[in-house]
Amino acid sequence: MSLLGNRYLKEGPGLYPEDMNKGPAARFFGVLGRKFWKIVTLNFMYVVFSLPILALSFLLAPTLMRFLIPGLTLDALREYFSRPEFVNSLAEGITPEAFAQTTLLFLYSLFALFQTAMAMFVLGPVHAGMTYVLRNYSREEHAFVWSDFWEHAKKNIGQSMVSCLISMVGSIALVVSFGYYRATIGNDIFRLFVMGFLLLIFTVFAVMHMYIYPMMVTFKLPIKNIYKNAFLFFTLRLFPNLGLFFLSVLLNLVIPLLLIFFLQLLGFYLVVLYYLLIGFGLQLLLTNFYVYQQLDRFMIQRLEEDGATPQPETEETKEIGDGAE
């Protein structure tokens, strides 16, 4: 089966001709600047409507992090922060016990936010609605923040719920497997090989989810074809995909972790404020800006080359093609 699978199309490309003369970075920051306050509004909506899944992610964070970092316990942190050189740096009235508890809370919260930012723990319809609006922004098309968000959240409710369940179950399975094999495999070289293999699977899984929701809101495809195409896109654009993945990890995990490490309580407040205002929206805009270019190049333009005209979505969207074996 080709990348197109059972091809159904909603809308064609929407970039203005004059924008194509600009470089990708200039176009991205141009969209971010023009749509900044709408993205902030969308981000706040996303946080509010994703509270159930954020709460679930936070509740699971202590268990999952014990599989990933078994040495990260309250007792270990208390012992570390009880060293004389560290105790002397604590503010007056702050005990090593209290500081250890606060640090764990920070790390659990960051882990939960990171899982949602990477589309591993999301509320499917909410994520689909957000993706549709930001996909339109990324290709310089208009979208109504409230009505388009909810229209496409409802329109994609079935596939998005399936996808979010797959991502959550898959993420938990990978984390548990990572901890289990690290603890049970005695041979150091084989253990490193298995852990590296699981990290590779997670990377593939995370990159695929960068494509799944944009395809879901752009094409009318069966869920199995969406996943198949997402995997094909991972292999087809391997190095750019890895670059986007590592940039996402940098923005959503490494930089927040450094802020918390160096600024402690202030850093945590800055991280929470970042996610409340723009963090999820910025990540999804970045993802959609890159992913839509790939969808346009390898799917939409191929349809046009085959002589098919991309049709706007209606209640009776026409079948563009059956795909080819």
Image: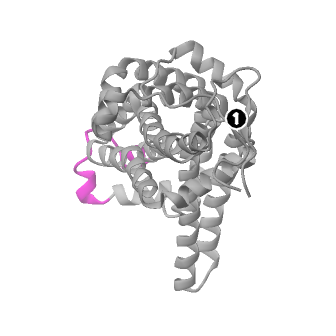
Residue 252 placement (x, y as % from top left): 41, 44
Q: Is residue 90 magenta?
A: yes
- Residue 58 visible in the picture: no
Quadrant including the N terminus: bottom right
* Residue 159 left/right relative to 121: right
Q: Return the residue nearer the eye: 316 or 63.
A: 316
Is residue 60 within the magenta segment? no
Provide residue 34's location: percent of width, then percent of height. 33, 20
Picture quadrant of residue 2: bottom right
Q: Which residue is mark 1?
A: 220
Residue under the image location 54 percent in, 78 percent down = 193
- Location of the C terminus by quadrant is bottom right
Name the amino acid type tagged 1: Lys
Frontmost residue, 314 versus 73 = 314
Residue at the spot 44% in from the left edge and 30% down from the top edge: 139
Q: In the visual, does 228 lie left or right of 235?
A: right
Secondary structure at badge 1 equals loop
Instruction: Tell me where the magenta segment starts and ends, as one range.
Output: 83-100
Toward the viewer: 232 or 210? 232
Residue 54 appears in which quarter of the rendering? Answer: top right
Front residue of 54/8: it is 8
